Amino acid sequence: MDFDEVIDRRGTHSSKWDTMEQVYGVSPDDGLAMWVADMDFRPPEAVQRAVEAMAAHGIYGYFGDDRAYRESIRWWMAERHGWEIDPAWIQTTNGLVNGTAMCVDTWTAPGDGVVLFTPVYHAFARVIRAAEREVVECPLAVRDGRYEMDFDAYDAQMTGREKMVILCSPHNPGGRVWTAAELRGVADFCKRHDLLLVSDEIHHDLVLPGHAHTVMARAAPEITDRLVMMSATTKTFNIAGAHVGNVIIPDDTRRKQFAQRMAALGISPNSFGLHMATAAYSPEGAEWVDALMRYIDGNRRIFDAGIARIPGLASMPLEATYLAWVDFTGTGMTTEEFTRRVERDARIAANHGTTFGKGGESFLRFNLATPRVRVEKAVGQLQKAFGDLQ
Ligand SMILES: Cc1ncc(COP(=O)(O)O)c(C=O)c1O
């Protein structure tokens, strides 16, 4: 668990490092990749051993018997999140963007509205629009420098064409761990407007010390008939390339509907993903995540302290995720100007806030899941790029 080790990812088909120049014009030779949400760390050794065992065996045939895989998810959910699930509730998709797309495909029709609390993870809107459904943006309110939901405003916005809500819990970007009361607010909103609730909880293990995530099913057990919960090992353990995700559907009828669409589209997971995920959801994996979050917390403190010293910049207080959401409003600069300074002057590739929907225009998102020296370097380069504001 040496999170300080700097591993050169360039030339490995890393989306984050090997496409940053194409996307942001920042060369990986002298720039910092702080965008795509994966980490510059190796996963727990248990995961490495699982892959090594597969490679040593050297036969990569069809996967069969997923009981150990299902049991590992059941165990993790009970042990880490206090939610007792039946392993039969789990549908395995090729990651959670795929899981989201499958939910949209299964339970909505072209022209239907799908509600998002924006700004939010950009792939939700991409999937909804590509499927020719309508994105209904319910803007999050900023109160005391953090995001909150405003259900009175959302109630007034509903037209009756909405069929589904996709919730990001904990929230990306913005790093909120929604409280049980807030989650019950979402559940009540879904009941009032007869909406299916897809709760994407992919960041649920990445919670910073002092905060605790509540799974939606525990916050609002009365809505399990309209709840689809999504979770994954990929974000938690940095194995996103394995493309494997859990779509947990407690309701029998809904689960059958989902399984039928999966069968119709011929979707089944790959064996690497299943082996890696099973190894990750283990006591060894749990120990690794706890150490990871202590390290991320250290990075976050250094980053936030550095940002606080630049007049006009404000980093939202992170409760979960390793993604810092920085507001540039106070600089008085246009989006083009502050983005140019971050990319050309500070040599940092960070996600543009505009891609997350309404309310993201004055923000950039910085990935802090990288060795501390890189976070320190980023802070120094940002302070220099905005030095004239000091
Ligand atoms: C909320 C959320 N859902 C899903 C994903 C991606 O999921 P996957 O890689 O399993 O498709 C991300 C990646 O950052 C995310 O933040």
Image (cartoon, rainbow, N blue to C red):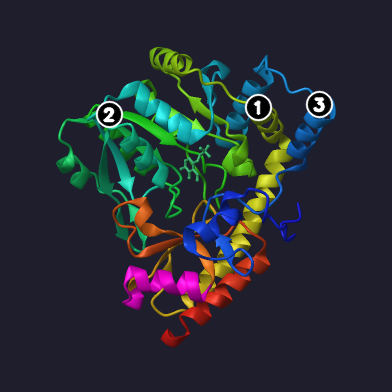
Q: Left or right: 217 with respect to 375?
A: left
Q: What stretch is highlighted in magenta?
A: 330-346
Residue matched to label 1? 274
Rendered view: 206 above or below 49: below
Name the residue: 41% across, 73% down: 313
Tell me, yes or no, whether the highlighted magenta stretch contains residue 341: yes
N-terminal of the pair, mark 3 or mark 1, is 3
Residue matched to label 3? 58
Amino acid type, label 2: Leu
Whole-Å distance between the Cαs marked 2 and 1? 32 Å
Tell me which secondary structure the magenta stretch mostly adopts: helix
At mark 3, the secondary structure is loop
In this rendering, the label closer to the viewer, 3 or 1: 3
Name the residue: 59% across, 24% down: 269
N-terminal of the pair, mark 2 or mark 3, is 3
Amino acid type, label 1: Leu
At mark 1, the secondary structure is helix
Rendered view: 165 above or below 262: below
Residue matched to label 2? 195
Q: Quarter-wise, where is residue 312 in the image? A: bottom left
Give the total of numbered labels: 3
Rendered view: 260 above or below 293: above
